[in-house]
Image (cartoon, grey):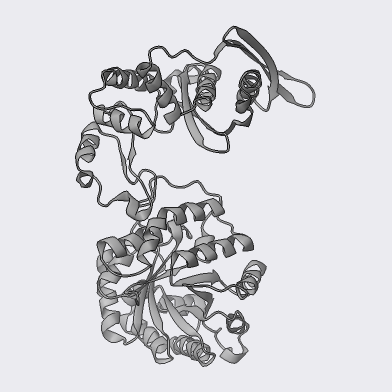
Amino acid sequence: MKPQVEIYDTTLRDGSQGEGINFSVADKLRIAEKLDSFGVHYIEGGWPGSNPKDIEFFAQAKKKKFKNARLAAFGSTRKKGVPVEQDDQVRLLIEAETPVVTIYGKTSLLHVKEVLRCTPEENLAMIGDTVRHLKDHGKFVIYDAEHAFDGYKLNAEYALDTWRAAEKAGADFVVLCDTNGGCLPGEITAITKTALGKLNCKIGIHTHDDIGLGVANALAALECGAVHVQGTINGYGERTGNCNLTSVIPCVALKMKKTSVPPKSLAKLKELSLFVDEVANLRHNSRQPWVGAAAFAHKGGAHVNAVQKLASSYEHIDPSLVGNQRNILISDLSGRSNIVIKAQELGFKITNETLELKAILNRIKELEHQGYEYEAAEASMALLIRGILDHRTEPKFVVEQYHVSMRRDAKQSICEATVRVRVGRTAHNEVAEGDGPVNALDSALRSALAKSFPKLKKVTLTDYKVRILDGVAGTAAKTRVLIQSTDNRREWGTVGVSENIIEASLEALVDSMEFALLKK
């Protein structure tokens, strides 16, 4: 079925211009393959000839067969005063051998006069010549009208002339670009309607997120008749980013009820979002709409109670439609429903009638008041619940003593930790050095415990965070430590709180080791 809205992904070009994002050729090829598998309609690979990386990417991409997407090369109109046949940049666009070529040209008279420094007539010729030349070489041509909205507001008739020049030369799409990302949805709607009324070719939209309206502006254009939307996965892009396709795609399918990517792909949306973040080496934004871990998270007791009875009471869709899931948070705002649902998620057989439920809730609220938090420390919470439910549970080990010291010689600082743990009637002593006091303590603790529990040799720390809870107290402030651990099969979080950062760290470490020893 022909889609009502085409998705044009520019993560590999516009997205890579975002701060902190640097894709290798291998990265770009992996993302392109993932985007094609997901079902986007166009993948913009970059600007051929602008840098060695993009040259290599297009050379490699020629060898690949894309099943769903058409690969696009990106560039600009010919230079002023240079015949299009002699323009090296245009030649490279053709030599990239992509089925689609996207070029941008100037809409705004301000840019024509101050940036290009050419006449308005020359700019129109540059647009028409380049589109016509690319069409003569059999390309599907998308014309990105740079600063379309700002240019229209400055001089509406000239803006329309630039769009008509592209259309007359044979452009398959004229895409209106809010390049500075500063327009409001009402402006987008009005100007897009004008373009639709004046042009006969298809209209697309390309927005940026400088005032937080990148997605809203894209949807506004689609609602009034645009049929093509450009953006990036996770909203990557220059300045504050581009229109976020992980929001646009489900909005088009689930809210606007328009066909776009294959319906079966929607359930892979979160997976796609996480994949691109992983390749970009960026921590996933948990507050991303639709695909973030917090997108369907519930914390307030009244909300959780309602969701338990009727999910749609506080969820606008079923999270599974986009590959996400409900997340029940535990805090001092929690009610009985929070505890029941979260405990069930963790594998405990617990209901609203469980006698220990009130004790669990009161204990969690008491500890939260002291500075503990369990949203990122579910392993510590599981141990707490287990301890209250099973009154006979004895700890598998006890840390009887520990000592951490630091010495410095002429060349380096050396941290050393000594730990004494008791497992049943057996005591284990261990000494270890580390890059810092926590690293040394972690090494000593695991080495001591591994004598009785060899499986702990596989446990490693993946993240360590410290939060000062009371800045007024200065260096005597209470400290919260959050630790993420893994055994290469699963990952879990634990928490410790104390005025002593080493004590807080040890508490989180002990919970981590104890959790690793649980069979369930």
Q: Quadrant of residue 78?
A: bottom right
Q: Residue at x 46, y 83 (%)?
A: 141
Q: Residue at x 41, y 84 (%)?
A: 172
The x, y position of residue 477, in whole percent, is 46, 19
Which of these two is toward me, 81 or 51?
51
Q: Quadrant of residue 418?
A: top right
Q: Quadrant of residue 349?
A: top left
Q: Residue at x 40, y 81 (%)?
A: 173
Which of these two is toward me, 391 or 40?
391
Q: Say whether residue 81 is visible.
A: yes
Is residue 6 toward the left or the right of residue 316 in the image?
right
Residue 102, relative to residue 480: is it above or below?
below
The x, y position of residue 181, in whole percent, is 38, 63
Is residue 276 toward the left or the right of residue 472 in the image?
right
Q: Say whether residue 415 is visible.
A: no
Which of these two is toward me, 165 or 436?
436
Which of these two is toward me, 518 or 364?
518
State the count of labels.
0
The x, y position of residue 345, in whole percent, is 36, 34
The x, y position of residue 235, in whole percent, is 43, 58
Residue 519, relative to residue 79: is it above or below?
above
- Image quadrant in which the N terminus is located: bottom left
Residue 298, relative to residue 134: is it above or below?
above
Q: Residue at x 55, y 55 (%)?
A: 21
